[in-house]
Image (cartoon, helix red, strand yellow):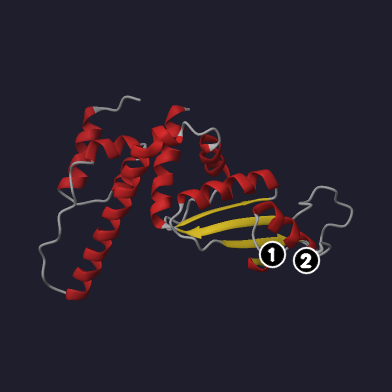
Amino acid sequence: MAHDAHLRAKAIELRAKHRMTLDDIVERLQLPKTTIYYWIKDIPIGRTEKQTERQKIGTRVMQAKYTAKREEAYEQGIAELPELLKEPTFRDFVVLYIGEGTKRDRNTVALVNSDAKTVKLAYYWMKRLSNNPHFAFRLQYHIDHDVSELKQYWAGILNISPDVITIMRKSNSGQLAGRQFRSVHGLLTVHVNDTYLRARLQAWMDFIKNEW
């Protein structure tokens, strides 16, 4: 996709002069993240030279540190993408996450679904790609469900202990009389706190969406 030269110049200015992060520039210019990344990847964010208000300075330095790490992870995601795309179900996982995954929180990778194969595929790739071994599982159920049976079902699908699955009753679970369309096995959320996997995943999602 071609972009006007002035947009590239603007992105470079926002990075070099105003020390804006990659995410901030994407939000400002409303352009694909991968495009802006390639424009500014060689322009680091300089540290502030102001030495007043120590607490604010410390906060800015810390924010800059983690911003740099997220951008490094995004770059890593781009670098490792060609090899990952050779694997049969990797693209399926990324496309699935584009449609069903949590995208608001840049520190979290999470997906919720009622389909066993969908959840199993997502968990396989999340577990394989994350450095955090501590996953959380939340089951949303209806009032007429057998919770113990559901936990055993999902534990078998994901090869986990049923004891690690927390439960939450759906808010409309008492309003389903006569309805045939509802989640037979409830809705399971697979969740992991992993800022850097989330940044890599963003790179993969951006790349694939840019192909559409």
Label 1 sits on what residue type?
A: Pro
Q: Which residue is mark 2?
A: 148
Identify the residue at the far top of this view: 2
* Horizontal side of residue 142 vs 28, given as left or right: right
Q: Is residue 191 above or below residue 54?
A: above
Q: Which residue type does callout 2 highlight?
A: Ser
Instruction: State the image quarter where residue 117 is shown.
Output: top right
Q: Residue at x 45, y 60 (%)?
A: 132
Provide residue 185's location: percent of width, then percent of height.
76, 54
- In the shown orientation, is residue 209 left or right of residue 66? right
Name the residue rendered at 53%, 46% in the picture. 125
Q: Residue at x 31, y 34 (%)?
A: 35
Q: Which residue is mark 1?
A: 162
Is residue 151 shown left or right of residue 118?
A: right
- CA distance for labels 2 and 1: 8 Å
Q: Dividing the image into 4 quarters, which one contains the N terminus?
A: top left
Residue 195 seen anywhere in this rendered image of the structure? yes
**Residue 207: % across, % down:** 41, 34
Which secondary structure lies at badge 1? Answer: helix
Proximity of marks 2 and 1: CB atoms separated by less than 8 Å: yes
Classify mark 1: residues with Cα within 10 Å, few (<14), some (14-19) or many (20+).
some
Residue closest to the eye, 191 or 156: 156
Q: Is residue 24 visible?
A: no
* Left or right of 97 in this view: 153: right
